[in-house]
Amino acid sequence: YRIFPDKYEIPLWAQKFTLHVGLEQIGRTLTCVEGLQITHEGFLHFKDLIRSSTMTRDQLSADKVGKREYIAFLTTTLEDYKGIQIDRELSFQINYTAMAGANTAAKWLADEIDATPSELAVLLDSCIPARLHKLINEPVNPKPSDHFNFNAFILSTLAEEEMEDSKIS
């Protein structure tokens, strides 16, 4: 709690951290299913925190932040990593995919959708428009396909942050 200005920043950090690990890597180092699965595995770790800020009218609610982040990730991946010019149709598909993903994640976190992270990833992947899916499903720099361990990732990230903090002190 010492590193956050107020308690309302904690769920947003948890969500952004999880989105960065999974969604941001789609098309960069992960396929769509891999990125979606990692994201939803992370959401399970922070479920109560993220759910506490979902579906409010505030611009910082989890679903609104998730949608904005997803749009930014897909746009950056296509433009900067793949050199693709985003036209009107592709822009619409990006916005649709982000909106559907954020709404589905909010319902899933509220236990309105009964699915494991893997099952939800496959379902969401099947809803991505064909043109967009083709462009983002092949990673630029694929990671080895062994199973991602979210717990190990969190622990290693926290250890790295502690080492950085001790260097600064």
Image: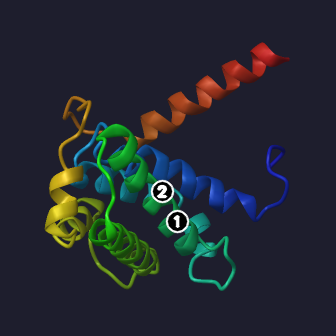
The mark tally for this picture is 2
Q: Quadrant of the C terminus?
A: top right
Left or right? Give the position of 4 relative to 20: right
Secondary structure at badge 1 equals helix
Report how far apart the C-alphas of labels 1 and 2 lie in the structure. 6 Å
Which residue was labeled with disc 2? 72
**Placement of 165 over or under 81, stated as above or below:** above
Which quadrant of the view contains residue 25?
top left
| Residue at 23 percent of width and 59 percent of height | 118
- State the SS at label 2: helix
Left or right position of 151 against 6: left
| Viewer-proximal residue among 56 and 44 | 56
Question: Looking at the picture, which amino acid does disc 1 mark?
Answer: Arg
Residue 152, position as x, y percentages in the image: 43, 34
Q: Position of residue 142 (x, y in %)?
A: 23, 32
Q: Is residue 160 above or below residue 32?
A: above
At label 2, the amino acid type is Ala
On the picture, is 20 further left or further right than 12?
Answer: left
Asked whether disc 1 touches disc 2, contact meaning CB atoms under 8 Å apart, the reply is: yes
What percent of the width, then of the height, locates residue 133? 19, 59
Q: Position of residue 93 (x, y in %)?
A: 29, 71
Say which of 69 and 37 sits in front.
Answer: 69
Point 34% across, 74% down: residue: 92
Q: Which mark is residue 41?
A: none
Q: Which one is nearer the viewer's eye here, 47 or 103? A: 103
Q: Mark 1 sits on what residue?
A: 68
Residue count near mark 1 (Cα–Cα under 10 Å), binned few <14, some 14–19, many ≥20: some
The 10 Å Cα crowd at callout 2, few under 14, some 14 to 19, many 20 or more, is some
